[in-house]
Image (spheres, coloured by chain):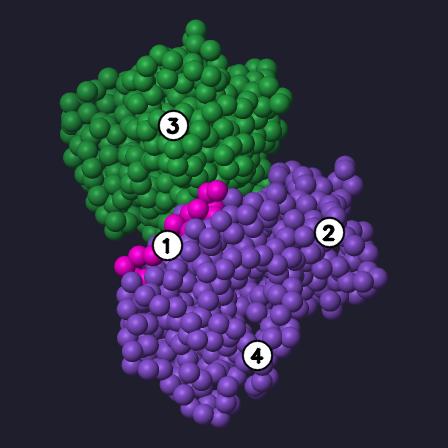
Chain colours: A purple, B green
């Protein structure tokens, strides 16, 4: 593959891409696939029976869809299980609170942890507080996540979830409660991963639903000492081996070169993982299915990867990158769908400069979908971070995430939150991306560590 | 009080009513009161410690607001307590379901009840089914409640909650799950009262959240037998005596005659009862507080009644009607606020025909609030049903309930669901109603059993 030519797509390929797009808009298997996954498997947290059921489902589904090859690759990780999780205000105004343990939180004792609440505006305020600021107390971080189409409120807010426990422990805290990292006002707490810093005492960590965080704030505003009791029964388990599930459309000219589209197959345990990330599974598998319906296979291969255990540390993505580290240059480009089921409004690329004219051609075919070109700084999706580190080209098909964090990692992540029409728009964009990339006569710069 | 005159309001009274209205729109104690109740008491299901705390709170709040008299009247009723409540699909697709027990449901055995699901479109279909249609099974009623501003979807849907269990038992069922009586798609089940028919076996009864009802439907549509296990640990308790809490503004001319405004003080246990019925408590107490701020007391008395235990059978309303049955003619008219915190869009009256011109005058003062007159068939509110049965005049200040059943009887009934501006509009309407009715030179026909 020459690095310096400026290739483009043929008129015929662009026409087929437009036809595939229109077919996707008329209807494909997208909704049916996510309905199947959420109904027949449901919650599928890494290491649970749901995880095993999802892998089985994924293999069967890809075979049923008629992929040329379907296989699995092992992914091994430590496990964690949720247990009882309750909390209540003991004084001055006894009433229950809705919480959920953060992923990999340690448990409290069986009788629970009872202590006074000390409130901080955000993680930063906690970090800057004096060493004994939370001595013997339960830290409460009240910071609210901001709503945004591009989900840009998540990053600044989620740090409290990831490292709040260790920061609180450094200040002498016995436990931590954070306002859920979410944009809703539903009385459901948002779970998600947290990590303990090495050498720091591990204290139990949970999220409060937004109304419960409001309640604590309102009590604290009265100037009285607020005492809370929290009981968490979570525990770590043994290592578990799950699998990335891979379906391939084998290319007709350069079968060893391939385009990746994919999503993560695991979910958190609270909902049925319809938005996170059943939608991505439905979109990418349905897009490939449309390409399988063409009279002939595209030039290059297309792999649909259902990544194992994204939620607890991109483990499936790392395993794939590791297993395929020696032939990264065969990956022509890649895109993961993992931001719910809202319509795509923008596409970003990460390609070598010489390939940008081809990207512009691709975007033209997406324009009727309401998709505009963004920039050449695409991230590609969480499970592609490890491959991206090895220099592959990626695309980000950016979805409207305005409502995504209303449901993210809560029991409310269920099928009814998916708008079938928006899903079809996603599938239409993915089929354009996958087909044209597989047909591309040039390359996007994968394996060349382009800046 | 003469029955046949056609009295009207004085210009001065209409002017004061308009001033009170404008004062309410500028801000009163309404939001502060409901914030206080939900924060300092929270859930207050009849017969629980929250009930006792609410009564104490109510007395203190009415005294703090400066009512001329504050007292309580006893209300005695049987009690019920929620216990564990879990459900899961056992086959063919194991996954958890979110349920909540219906009020006064019996428990399952400790190991739970496991049986095949038999689905019915609605209560009617269940009633019309053959005698053994549910033999040994768990009945699932999938009927969806319709959304409507006036809440008219509630009546047809809620029958399944009230009598579904006994109807299912008549067909041999071991348990019943209904789709929640609600209009939301949140993964929260709606509780509420049910009743067992005498002589029919009592079977456990619970509601599924909307997404879980969808899930069951989707599984059943696949044509396979669906087995569910449900565990309910609810139990009935001893009789308990709570109290109606009453605050009076004592009239300056006819203190023995009075206008009732009120709401119910109890709530279900799942939320903090902000909409049901903390809002009503805030609106009516704040409206009275504005009248207490006038340079002189109105001619007649005004009673703010915080009714005990509305949720489990209008027990407070019945107790009040019973305790005051001999002087019902002293009640000039009455209105209860118990439909959330949406703006009032219509006012209905139930008055003698001669009083209708005065009602029209009252409505004129409400017009700037966007309130129009409806008809003379007002219901007045649940806790006024027993008094209405004794012939009193009532008014219905009808709120926009479009979203009310999204939150009704769920954990989601929390303070954040209240729009302070809409609350102010309610208070403005109630202060007009209460003040003008207390000043009225004629009467509305109370105690005369008008048609
Ligand atoms: Zn995800
Ligand atoms: Zn996630
Ligand atoms: Zn109510
Ligand atoms: Zn109610």
Q: CA distance from mark 1 to mark 2?
A: 35 Å
Whether residue B173 is visible here, answered yes or no, is yes
Residues at marks 1 and 4 touching, judged by CB atoms closer than 8 Å? no
Q: Is residue A189 visible?
A: no
Q: Which residue is mark 1?
A: A29
Q: Mark 1: few, some, or many residues within 10 Å (few <14, many ≥20)?
A: many
Q: Position of residue B138 (x, y in %)?
A: 46, 23
Q: Quadrant of residue A165?
A: bottom right
- Asked if labels 3 and 2 touch by Cβ distance under 8 angstroms, the answer is no
Query: Seen from this angle, which residue lies furthest top?
Result: B199
Depth order, front residue of B184/A345: A345
Question: Vertical placement of B399 versus B51: above or below?
Answer: below
CA distance for labels 3 and 4: 55 Å
Q: Are marks 1 and 3 on the same chain?
A: no
Residue sitting at 39 percent across and 55 percent down? A30
Image position of B289 (left or right of B46) = left
In the rendered image, residue B395, in percent from the top left (x then y), is placed at 28, 32
- Tell me residue B413's x, y (percent): 48, 41
Q: In the image, which disc is placed on residue A239?
A: 2
Closer to the eye: label 2 or 3: 2
Point out the image quarter for the C terminus of chain A: bottom right
Magenta stretch containing residue B78, yes or no? no
Nearest to viewer (mark 1 / mark 3)? 1
Say which of marks 2 and 4 sits in front: 4
The alpha-carbon separation of the residues under discs 1 and 3 comes to 27 Å
| Front label number (3 vs 4) | 4
Tell me which numbered mark, 2 or 4, is placed earlier along the sequence. Answer: 2
| Magenta region includes residue A32 | yes
* Residue carrying label 4: A329
Name the residue at the right extreme. Answer: A199
Magenta highlight range: A24-40
């Amino acid at each position: 593959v020459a690095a310096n030519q400026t290739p483009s797509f043929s008129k015929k390929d662009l026409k087929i891409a437009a036809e595939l797009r229109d077919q996707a808009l008329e209807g494909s298997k997208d909704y049916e696939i996510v309905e199947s996954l959420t109904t027949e498997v449901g919650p599928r947290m890494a290491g649970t029976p749901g995880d095993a059921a999802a892998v089985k489902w994924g293999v069967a589904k890809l075979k049923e869809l008629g992929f040329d090859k379907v296989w699995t690759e092992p992914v091994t990780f430590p496990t964690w299980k949720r247990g009882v999780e309750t909390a209540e205000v003991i004084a001055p105004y006894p009433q229950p609170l809705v919480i959920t343990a953060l992923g990999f939180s340690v448990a409290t004792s069986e009788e629970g942890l009872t202590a006074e609440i000390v409130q901080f505006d955000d993680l930063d305020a906690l970090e800057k507080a004096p060493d004994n600021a939370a001595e013997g107390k339960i830290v409460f971080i009240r910071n609210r996540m901001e709503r945004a189409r591009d989900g840009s409120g998540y990053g600044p807010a989620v740090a409290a979830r990831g490292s709040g426990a260790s920061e609180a422990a450094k200040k002498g805290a016995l436990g931590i409660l954070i306002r859920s990292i979410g944009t809703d006002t539903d009385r459901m707490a948002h779970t998600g991963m947290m990590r303990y810093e090495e050498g720091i005492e591990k204290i139990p960590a949970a999220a409060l639903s937004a109304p419960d965080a409001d309640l604590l704030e309102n009590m604290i505003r009265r100037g009285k000492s607020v005492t809370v009791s929290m009981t968490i029964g979570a525990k770590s388990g043994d290592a578990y081996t799950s699998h990335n599930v891979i379906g391939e459309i084998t290319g007709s000219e350069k079968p060893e070169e391939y385009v990746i589209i994919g999503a993560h197959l695991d979910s958190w345990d609270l909902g049925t993982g319809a938005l996170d990330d059943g939608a991505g599974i439905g979109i990418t598998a349905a897009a490939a299915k449309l390409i399988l319906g063409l009279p002939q296979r595209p030039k290059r291969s297309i792999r649909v990867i259902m990544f194992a255990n994204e939620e607890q540390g991109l483990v499936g993505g790392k395993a794939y990158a590791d297993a395929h580290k020696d032939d990264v240059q065969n990956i022509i480009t890649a895109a993961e769908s993992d931001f719910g089921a809202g319509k795509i409004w923008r596409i970003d690329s990460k390609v070598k400069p010489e390939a940008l004219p081809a990207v512009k051609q691709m975007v033209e075919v997406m324009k009727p979908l309401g998709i505009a070109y963004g920039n050449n700084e695409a991230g590609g999706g969480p499970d592609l971070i490890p491959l991206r580190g090895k220099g592959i080209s990626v695309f980000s098909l950016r979805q409207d995430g305005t409502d995504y964090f209303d449901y993210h990692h809560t029991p409310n992540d269920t099928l009814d939150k998916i708008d079938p029409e928006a899903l079809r728009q996603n599938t239409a964009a993915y089929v354009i991306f996958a087909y044209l990339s597989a047909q591309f006569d040039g390359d996007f710069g994968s394996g060349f560590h382009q800046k």
